[in-house]
Amino acid sequence: MNTTQYTVFHLSHTDLDGYGSQFITKNYFQNIRFYNSNYGKEIDERYAQILADIQNVKAEKSVILITDLNLTPEQAKNFEERLKNVKSSVKLILLDHHQSADECAKKYPWYFLDSSRCAAKITYDFFSKIYGEKKRLGRLSEVINAVDIWLEDSADFELGKVCLNLISNAKELNRIMFDDANTQYMFCLLQNVIKYTDKKEPHILLDDDTHSIKKSFFQNGGNDTLGNLVSKYNVEQLGKMKDKMTVFYKGYKAILTFNIGAVSVIGNNFLTQNPDYDFFMDVTSRKTVSFRANGKTNVSKIAFELANGGGHPNASGGTIAGFRDSFLYENVKNQIINLLKSKEEST
Protein backbone atom coordinates (compact mmCIF):
# COMPACT_ATOMS: atom_id res chain seq x y z
CA MET A 1 0.00 0.00 0.00
CA ASN A 2 1.68 3.17 -1.26
CA THR A 3 1.36 6.03 1.25
CA THR A 4 0.76 8.58 -1.52
CA GLN A 5 -1.57 6.38 -3.55
CA TYR A 6 -4.31 6.11 -0.95
CA THR A 7 -6.44 8.64 0.90
CA VAL A 8 -6.82 7.46 4.49
CA PHE A 9 -9.91 8.15 6.58
CA HIS A 10 -8.89 7.37 10.15
CA LEU A 11 -11.57 6.92 12.83
CA SER A 12 -10.35 6.46 16.39
CA HIS A 13 -11.35 6.75 20.03
CA THR A 14 -11.27 10.01 22.02
CA ASP A 15 -8.64 9.04 24.59
CA LEU A 16 -4.85 8.79 24.77
CA ASP A 17 -4.77 5.48 22.92
CA GLY A 18 -7.13 6.73 20.22
CA TYR A 19 -5.35 10.00 19.54
CA GLY A 20 -2.00 8.24 19.89
CA SER A 21 -2.98 5.86 17.09
CA GLN A 22 -3.85 8.81 14.86
CA PHE A 23 -0.66 10.66 15.72
CA ILE A 24 1.26 7.60 14.54
CA THR A 25 -0.58 7.32 11.21
CA LYS A 26 -0.10 11.06 10.64
CA ASN A 27 3.62 10.34 10.49
CA TYR A 28 3.19 7.66 7.83
CA PHE A 29 0.55 9.04 5.45
CA GLN A 30 0.32 12.30 3.53
CA ASN A 31 -3.34 12.18 2.48
CA ILE A 32 -5.22 11.50 5.69
CA ARG A 33 -8.35 12.75 7.42
CA PHE A 34 -9.11 12.22 11.10
CA TYR A 35 -12.38 11.46 12.87
CA ASN A 36 -12.97 10.66 16.52
CA SER A 37 -15.76 8.90 18.33
CA ASN A 38 -16.91 7.49 21.62
CA TYR A 39 -18.84 4.23 21.62
CA GLY A 40 -22.46 3.73 20.62
CA LYS A 41 -24.39 5.81 18.12
CA GLU A 42 -21.49 8.17 17.43
CA ILE A 43 -19.51 5.42 15.71
CA ASP A 44 -22.34 4.96 13.21
CA GLU A 45 -22.62 8.71 12.58
CA ARG A 46 -18.90 9.06 12.04
CA TYR A 47 -18.82 6.09 9.67
CA ALA A 48 -21.62 7.67 7.64
CA GLN A 49 -19.64 10.91 7.61
CA ILE A 50 -16.58 9.09 6.30
CA LEU A 51 -18.53 7.39 3.50
CA ALA A 52 -19.97 10.76 2.46
CA ASP A 53 -16.51 12.34 2.50
CA ILE A 54 -15.09 9.54 0.37
CA GLN A 55 -17.72 10.28 -2.26
CA ASN A 56 -17.12 14.03 -2.05
CA VAL A 57 -13.32 13.93 -2.41
CA LYS A 58 -13.67 11.40 -5.24
CA ALA A 59 -10.57 9.51 -4.14
CA GLU A 60 -9.90 6.60 -6.47
CA LYS A 61 -8.36 4.50 -3.72
CA SER A 62 -9.26 4.94 -0.08
CA VAL A 63 -8.57 3.26 3.23
CA ILE A 64 -10.97 3.43 6.15
CA LEU A 65 -8.83 2.79 9.20
CA ILE A 66 -10.54 2.25 12.55
CA THR A 67 -8.44 2.05 15.73
CA ASP A 68 -9.19 1.64 19.44
CA LEU A 69 -12.91 1.14 18.80
CA ASN A 70 -14.52 -2.30 18.99
CA LEU A 71 -17.62 -2.82 16.88
CA THR A 72 -20.69 -4.82 17.75
CA PRO A 73 -21.46 -7.73 15.38
CA GLU A 74 -24.34 -5.67 13.96
CA GLN A 75 -22.06 -2.69 13.31
CA ALA A 76 -19.38 -4.82 11.68
CA LYS A 77 -21.93 -6.41 9.35
CA ASN A 78 -23.45 -3.04 8.53
CA PHE A 79 -20.06 -1.43 7.87
CA GLU A 80 -19.05 -4.15 5.43
CA GLU A 81 -22.42 -4.08 3.66
CA ARG A 82 -22.40 -0.30 3.20
CA LEU A 83 -19.01 -0.43 1.47
CA LYS A 84 -20.67 -2.26 -1.42
CA ASN A 85 -22.51 0.97 -2.28
CA VAL A 86 -19.31 3.01 -2.51
CA LYS A 87 -18.19 3.33 -6.12
CA SER A 88 -14.47 3.92 -5.48
CA SER A 89 -12.03 1.30 -4.27
CA VAL A 90 -12.07 1.20 -0.47
CA LYS A 91 -10.09 -0.96 1.94
CA LEU A 92 -11.42 -1.38 5.48
CA ILE A 93 -8.91 -2.04 8.28
CA LEU A 94 -9.67 -2.21 11.99
CA LEU A 95 -6.89 -2.44 14.59
CA ASP A 96 -8.09 -3.00 18.14
CA HIS A 97 -7.32 -4.66 21.46
CA HIS A 98 -10.70 -5.02 23.20
CA GLN A 99 -11.33 -8.71 23.84
CA SER A 100 -15.09 -8.16 23.71
CA ALA A 101 -14.81 -8.00 19.91
CA ASP A 102 -13.52 -11.57 19.58
CA GLU A 103 -16.61 -12.67 17.63
CA CYS A 104 -16.10 -9.95 15.00
CA ALA A 105 -12.38 -10.63 14.70
CA LYS A 106 -13.01 -14.29 13.93
CA LYS A 107 -15.59 -13.47 11.27
CA TYR A 108 -14.07 -10.58 9.33
CA PRO A 109 -10.59 -10.64 7.74
CA TRP A 110 -10.29 -6.83 8.01
CA TYR A 111 -10.79 -6.96 11.78
CA PHE A 112 -7.43 -7.35 13.55
CA LEU A 113 -7.60 -7.99 17.31
CA ASP A 114 -4.73 -8.37 19.77
CA SER A 115 -5.56 -7.89 23.45
CA SER A 116 -1.88 -8.04 24.48
CA ARG A 117 -1.11 -4.55 23.09
CA CYS A 118 -2.91 -1.22 23.10
CA ALA A 119 -4.22 0.17 19.81
CA ALA A 120 -1.42 2.72 19.46
CA LYS A 121 1.23 0.00 19.73
CA ILE A 122 -0.68 -2.25 17.33
CA THR A 123 -0.92 0.67 14.89
CA TYR A 124 2.79 1.46 15.17
CA ASP A 125 3.86 -2.18 14.83
CA PHE A 126 1.52 -2.65 11.86
CA PHE A 127 2.70 0.31 9.81
CA SER A 128 6.35 0.25 10.88
CA LYS A 129 6.65 -3.25 9.44
CA ILE A 130 5.34 -1.99 6.11
CA TYR A 131 6.96 1.44 5.87
CA GLY A 132 9.88 1.29 8.28
CA GLU A 133 10.53 2.06 11.92
CA LYS A 134 10.41 5.54 13.43
CA LYS A 135 12.08 5.11 16.79
CA ARG A 136 10.54 8.08 18.56
CA LEU A 137 7.07 7.01 17.48
CA GLY A 138 7.89 3.55 18.75
CA ARG A 139 8.84 4.98 22.14
CA LEU A 140 5.59 6.91 22.32
CA SER A 141 3.61 3.74 21.54
CA GLU A 142 5.42 1.95 24.38
CA VAL A 143 4.54 4.73 26.83
CA ILE A 144 0.87 4.64 25.79
CA ASN A 145 0.88 0.85 25.95
CA ALA A 146 2.24 0.85 29.50
CA VAL A 147 -0.69 2.83 30.87
CA ASP A 148 -3.47 1.68 28.53
CA ILE A 149 -3.12 -2.00 29.41
CA TRP A 150 -1.89 -1.05 32.91
CA LEU A 151 1.66 -2.44 33.09
CA GLU A 152 2.52 -1.15 36.56
CA ASP A 153 5.98 -2.73 36.48
CA SER A 154 6.92 -0.97 33.24
CA ALA A 155 9.50 1.81 33.38
CA ASP A 156 7.09 3.85 31.19
CA PHE A 157 4.07 3.44 33.46
CA GLU A 158 4.36 6.71 35.41
CA LEU A 159 4.99 8.76 32.28
CA GLY A 160 2.01 7.01 30.69
CA LYS A 161 -0.20 8.09 33.60
CA VAL A 162 0.78 11.73 33.10
CA CYS A 163 0.10 11.40 29.36
CA LEU A 164 -3.29 9.85 30.10
CA ASN A 165 -4.28 12.84 32.23
CA LEU A 166 -2.78 15.27 29.73
CA ILE A 167 -5.11 14.08 26.97
CA SER A 168 -8.19 13.39 29.11
CA ASN A 169 -8.00 16.88 30.64
CA ALA A 170 -7.47 18.66 27.31
CA LYS A 171 -11.03 19.98 27.15
CA GLU A 172 -10.19 23.46 25.88
CA LEU A 173 -11.64 22.91 22.41
CA ASN A 174 -15.02 21.56 21.37
CA ARG A 175 -14.28 18.55 19.16
CA ILE A 176 -17.75 18.55 17.56
CA MET A 177 -17.45 22.10 16.21
CA PHE A 178 -13.67 22.36 15.93
CA ASP A 179 -12.72 18.79 15.11
CA ASP A 180 -9.67 19.67 12.99
CA ALA A 181 -8.34 22.18 15.51
CA ASN A 182 -8.97 19.77 18.37
CA THR A 183 -7.07 17.02 16.57
CA GLN A 184 -4.14 19.36 15.96
CA TYR A 185 -4.21 20.29 19.65
CA MET A 186 -3.98 16.64 20.68
CA PHE A 187 -1.16 16.06 18.20
CA CYS A 188 0.70 19.07 19.59
CA LEU A 189 0.46 17.62 23.11
CA LEU A 190 1.69 14.21 21.94
CA GLN A 191 4.53 15.76 19.94
CA ASN A 192 5.67 17.42 23.16
CA VAL A 193 5.41 14.13 25.08
CA ILE A 194 7.98 12.56 22.76
CA LYS A 195 10.55 15.09 23.97
CA TYR A 196 10.34 13.62 27.47
CA THR A 197 10.47 9.89 26.73
CA ASP A 198 14.24 9.56 27.16
CA LYS A 199 14.72 12.03 30.01
CA LYS A 200 15.39 11.18 33.67
CA GLU A 201 12.15 11.19 35.70
CA PRO A 202 10.16 12.21 32.61
CA HIS A 203 6.79 11.94 34.37
CA ILE A 204 7.73 14.64 36.85
CA LEU A 205 9.17 16.92 34.18
CA LEU A 206 6.13 16.55 31.94
CA ASP A 207 3.78 17.11 34.85
CA ASP A 208 5.66 20.29 35.77
CA ASP A 209 5.52 21.58 32.19
CA THR A 210 1.94 20.64 31.29
CA HIS A 211 0.50 24.12 31.74
CA SER A 212 3.16 25.73 29.57
CA ILE A 213 2.78 23.06 26.89
CA LYS A 214 -0.96 23.72 26.69
CA LYS A 215 -0.45 27.47 26.51
CA SER A 216 2.09 27.11 23.71
CA PHE A 217 -0.59 25.79 21.36
CA PHE A 218 -2.89 28.77 21.91
CA GLN A 219 -0.27 31.50 21.98
CA ASN A 220 -0.04 33.70 18.94
CA GLY A 221 2.27 36.51 19.88
CA GLY A 222 1.80 37.87 23.40
CA ASN A 223 1.36 35.85 26.56
CA ASP A 224 -1.76 35.71 28.73
CA THR A 225 -3.57 33.35 31.09
CA LEU A 226 -4.54 29.98 29.61
CA GLY A 227 -8.21 30.87 30.03
CA ASN A 228 -7.86 34.11 28.08
CA LEU A 229 -5.77 32.47 25.37
CA VAL A 230 -8.33 29.70 24.94
CA SER A 231 -11.23 32.15 24.76
CA LYS A 232 -9.40 34.21 22.16
CA TYR A 233 -8.61 31.09 20.15
CA ASN A 234 -12.24 29.94 20.25
CA VAL A 235 -13.44 33.33 19.00
CA GLU A 236 -10.87 33.20 16.20
CA GLN A 237 -12.11 29.74 15.19
CA LEU A 238 -15.71 30.97 15.19
CA GLY A 239 -14.66 33.90 13.03
CA LYS A 240 -13.20 31.52 10.45
CA MET A 241 -16.28 29.30 10.44
CA LYS A 242 -19.03 31.86 10.99
CA ASP A 243 -20.47 31.65 7.49
CA LYS A 244 -21.47 28.01 7.92
CA MET A 245 -22.65 28.64 11.51
CA THR A 246 -24.93 31.60 10.74
CA VAL A 247 -28.69 31.40 11.31
CA PHE A 248 -31.47 34.00 11.02
CA TYR A 249 -34.55 34.67 13.10
CA LYS A 250 -37.07 37.39 12.29
CA GLY A 251 -34.44 39.38 10.43
CA TYR A 252 -31.85 39.04 13.19
CA LYS A 253 -28.51 37.48 12.36
CA ALA A 254 -27.00 35.02 14.86
CA ILE A 255 -24.17 32.54 15.19
CA LEU A 256 -25.14 29.09 16.41
CA THR A 257 -22.70 27.07 18.53
CA PHE A 258 -22.99 23.67 20.17
CA ASN A 259 -21.64 22.97 23.68
CA ILE A 260 -19.19 25.85 23.34
CA GLY A 261 -18.88 26.51 27.08
CA ALA A 262 -17.91 29.85 28.67
CA VAL A 263 -20.82 31.39 26.77
CA SER A 264 -20.64 34.79 28.47
CA VAL A 265 -16.98 35.37 27.64
CA ILE A 266 -16.88 33.79 24.17
CA GLY A 267 -20.30 35.09 23.17
CA ASN A 268 -19.62 38.68 24.14
CA ASN A 269 -16.13 38.65 22.61
CA PHE A 270 -17.50 37.28 19.35
CA LEU A 271 -20.27 39.88 19.16
CA THR A 272 -17.81 42.67 19.90
CA GLN A 273 -15.51 41.53 17.08
CA ASN A 274 -18.37 40.82 14.68
CA PRO A 275 -20.81 43.75 14.99
CA ASP A 276 -22.87 42.53 12.02
CA TYR A 277 -24.25 39.75 14.25
CA ASP A 278 -27.25 40.51 16.47
CA PHE A 279 -27.03 37.66 18.95
CA PHE A 280 -25.11 34.54 19.98
CA MET A 281 -26.91 31.22 20.51
CA ASP A 282 -25.40 28.11 22.12
CA VAL A 283 -27.29 24.79 22.32
CA THR A 284 -26.13 21.99 24.61
CA SER A 285 -26.56 18.22 24.69
CA ARG A 286 -28.81 18.71 27.74
CA LYS A 287 -31.36 20.55 25.52
CA THR A 288 -30.59 23.88 27.18
CA VAL A 289 -29.87 26.97 25.11
CA SER A 290 -28.07 30.19 26.04
CA PHE A 291 -28.46 33.52 24.29
CA ARG A 292 -26.13 36.50 24.42
CA ALA A 293 -26.54 39.95 22.86
CA ASN A 294 -24.59 43.17 22.83
CA GLY A 295 -27.37 45.72 22.96
CA LYS A 296 -28.67 45.12 19.43
CA THR A 297 -31.64 42.92 20.34
CA ASN A 298 -33.55 41.69 23.37
CA VAL A 299 -32.64 38.02 23.72
CA SER A 300 -34.98 37.53 26.69
CA LYS A 301 -37.84 37.85 24.22
CA ILE A 302 -36.15 35.50 21.76
CA ALA A 303 -35.48 32.99 24.56
CA PHE A 304 -39.17 33.06 25.48
CA GLU A 305 -40.31 32.54 21.89
CA LEU A 306 -37.83 29.78 21.03
CA ALA A 307 -37.23 27.96 24.30
CA ASN A 308 -39.93 28.96 26.78
CA GLY A 309 -37.21 30.79 28.68
CA GLY A 310 -36.16 34.30 29.54
CA GLY A 311 -33.68 36.33 31.49
CA HIS A 312 -32.01 39.65 30.74
CA PRO A 313 -32.01 41.64 27.47
CA ASN A 314 -28.36 40.69 26.82
CA ALA A 315 -28.20 37.28 28.58
CA SER A 316 -30.98 34.72 28.59
CA GLY A 317 -31.62 31.02 28.39
CA GLY A 318 -34.18 28.27 28.06
CA THR A 319 -34.80 24.66 27.07
CA ILE A 320 -35.59 23.18 23.66
CA ALA A 321 -37.79 20.25 24.64
CA GLY A 322 -37.69 18.47 21.29
CA PHE A 323 -33.96 18.80 20.67
CA ARG A 324 -32.19 15.56 19.75
CA ASP A 325 -28.53 15.31 20.65
CA SER A 326 -26.10 14.63 17.81
CA PHE A 327 -22.40 14.19 17.19
CA LEU A 328 -22.40 16.21 13.97
CA TYR A 329 -22.76 19.97 13.98
CA GLU A 330 -24.72 19.93 10.72
CA ASN A 331 -27.44 17.81 12.36
CA VAL A 332 -27.69 20.27 15.23
CA LYS A 333 -27.90 23.25 12.90
CA ASN A 334 -30.62 21.66 10.77
CA GLN A 335 -32.76 21.09 13.86
CA ILE A 336 -32.36 24.69 15.00
CA ILE A 337 -33.10 26.08 11.53
CA ASN A 338 -36.34 24.08 11.48
CA LEU A 339 -37.20 25.40 14.94
CA LEU A 340 -36.53 29.02 13.92
CA LYS A 341 -38.66 28.66 10.78
CA SER A 342 -41.57 27.05 12.66
CA LYS A 343 -41.51 29.76 15.35
CA GLU A 344 -41.41 32.51 12.75
CA GLU A 345 -44.43 31.05 11.01
CA SER A 346 -46.40 30.71 14.24
CA THR A 347 -45.75 34.18 15.69
Image: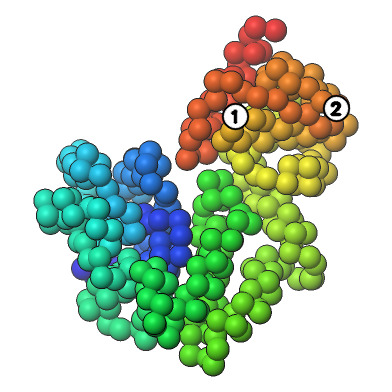
Mark 1 residue crowding within 10 angstroms, few (<14) / some (14–19) / many (20+) = some
In this view of the protein, which residue sits in the foreground, 222 or 203?
A: 203
x, y percentage for residue 292? 78, 34
Quadrant of the rendering where the C terminus is positioned: top right
- On the question of residue 8 being in view, the answer is no
Q: Quadrant of residue 67?
A: bottom left
Q: At x 33% / y 54%, what residue is drawn?
A: 69
In this view of the protein, which residue sits in the foreground, 183 or 209?
A: 209
x, y percentage for residue 343? 64, 13
- SS at circle 1: loop
Q: Earlier in the sequence, mark 1 or mark 2?
A: 1
Identify the residue position indicated by label 2 in the image.
312
Identify the residue position indicated by label 1 in the image.
287
Quadrant of the rendering where the N terminus is positioned: bottom left
Mark 2 residue crowding within 10 angstroms, few (<14) / some (14–19) / many (20+) = some
Question: What is the residue that sits farthest to the right in this orientation?
Answer: 295
**346 lies left or right of 7:** right
Mark 1 belongs to which amino acid?
Lys
x, y percentage for residue 80? 19, 44
- On screen, residue 209 above or below 255: below
Render colour scheme: rainbow
Q: At x 79% / y 19%, what residue is drawn?
A: 301
Q: CA distance from mark 1 to mark 2?
A: 20 Å
- SS at circle 2: strand
Q: At x 54% / y 92%, what residue is drawn?
A: 200
x, y percentage for residue 184? 53, 63
* Pointer 1 with pointer 2, Cβ within 8 A: no
Question: What is the residue that sits farthest to the bottom in this orientation?
Answer: 200
- On the question of residue 124 being in view, the answer is yes
- On screen, residue 122 above or below 60: below
